[in-house]
Image (cartoon, rainbow, N blue to C red):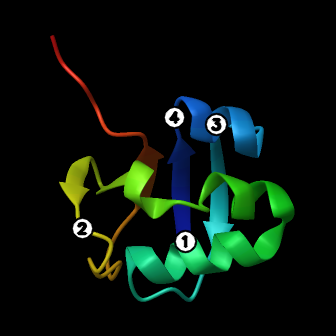
Amino acid sequence: MTLRVLYFAWLRERIGTGREEVETGAATVADLVEELRAREERYAVAFADMTTVRAAVDQELVPLDTPLAGAREVAFFPPMTGG
């Protein structure tokens, strides 16, 4: 399947792009992260500490074990803070 993958904040800076189309066989968000980590060092660095990364599938905040079946977009971003 082809997914639009979006990266925000320091993830975008470390990976070097804000969005890309990714051909993947990943079943879950966690599987996608593993595929991305294996691509290049810049992805491995960006996803080194998953306690500092949140994910959304089709604009809905989700845990990493969320299935990707039927998904069109996955976004990765740091935890949000408010004030």
Q: In what element is the residue under mark 4?
A: loop
The residue indicated by pointer 4 is: 8
Q: In what element is the residue under mark 3?
A: helix
Q: Quadrant of residue 10?
A: top right
- Marks 3 and 2: in contact by CB < 8 Å? no
Residue 33 got which mark? 1
Upstream in sequence: badge 2 or badge 3? 3
- Marks 3 and 4: in contact by CB < 8 Å? yes
In space, the residues marked 1 and 2 are separated at their CA atoms by: 12 Å
Residue 54 got which mark? none
Q: Which residue appears farthest toward the top when viewing the image? A: 83
Residue 67's place in the image compared with 18, above or below, is: below
Percent x, y of residue 42: 80, 54
Upstream in sequence: badge 1 or badge 3? 3
| Callout 4 crowding tier (Cα within 10 Å): few <14, some 14–19, many ≥20 | some
Report the front residue among 59 and 39: 39
The residue indicated by pointer 2 is: 63
In space, the residues marked 2 and 4 are separated at their CA atoms by: 17 Å
In space, the residues marked 4 and 3 are separated at their CA atoms by: 5 Å
Q: Residue at 66%, 50% (x, y): give it.
A: 20
The amino acid type found where label 2 is placed reads Pro
Residue 17's place in the image compared with 61, above or below, is: above
Q: Is residue 79 left or right of residue 7?
A: left
